[in-house]
Image (cartoon, rainbow, N blue to C red):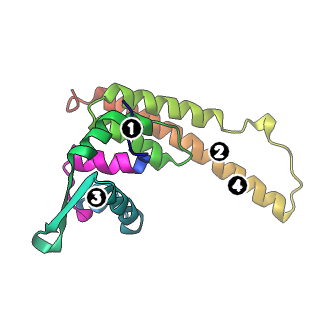
Amino acid sequence: MKPAIDASPMDYFILATVSRGGLHSLYELQKGVGLQPGAIHPVLRRLEGGGLLARLPQAKRRRRLMTVTPKGEQVLDTGWKDSLQTYPEPESVLRAASIAVLMGDRQLACNHLWSAASIYEQQIPRPDEQQAKPLTPIGWHGLMRSSWETARRQSAATVFRDVARKLMESEAMR
């Protein structure tokens, strides 16, 4: 059964970290998973407005604790796999894998990371595919951008594979 709400991957990430990750305040989300207030406030408002997340009155240190509502739990349980897509940004790939881990499916998280690594590697330009550009300032800029993109994709693919391997080897996750 599909959820009645069109939840975004970030919605699932927030719901999973609050429900199963033990992070219950904006401060904990910032420190625990590196989310910035400017990016997270619209997501929290949308989740609250949809009845998926409740923010309790201020607790100590003026922190408002969050809890996932029963409706939010249902949306999370029935739709979290929708977040397992290949994204252009490595951070989003890692968040999607984290959702799978939080939902108790370590194997699916690893498969997602391995798949993303393969896709990233397929997008690396081959030396014979790179056209020789005149070495004008614009040509140099193109060469620098291409070199940067190649290194970024290779690095991301390596990180995805390393994280998947460590996740599979982790005794704490068994």
Judging from the image, what secondary structure is the residue with disc 2 in? helix
**Residue at the extreme right:** 134
Question: Counting residues from the N terminus, which is met first, the one under dot 2 or under dot 3?
Answer: 3
The amino acid at mark 2 is Thr
Disc number at residue 150?
2
Tell me the CA gap for discs 2 and 3: 32 Å
Judging from the image, what secondary structure is the residue with disc 3 in? helix
Vertical relation: 155 (above or below) 172? below
Vertical relation: 119 (above or below) 22? above
For the residue pair 109 and 54, the one nearer the viewer reads as: 54
Indicate yes or no whether the magenta region holds residue 16. yes
Disc number at residue 29?
3
Q: Which residue is mark 1?
A: 97
The amino acid at mark 4 is Arg
Question: Counting residues from the N terminus, which is met first, the one under dot 2 or under dot 1?
Answer: 1
**Of helix, strand and loop, which mostly describes the magenta segment?**
helix
For the residue pair 50 and 55, the one nearer the viewer reads as: 50
Disc number at residue 145?
4
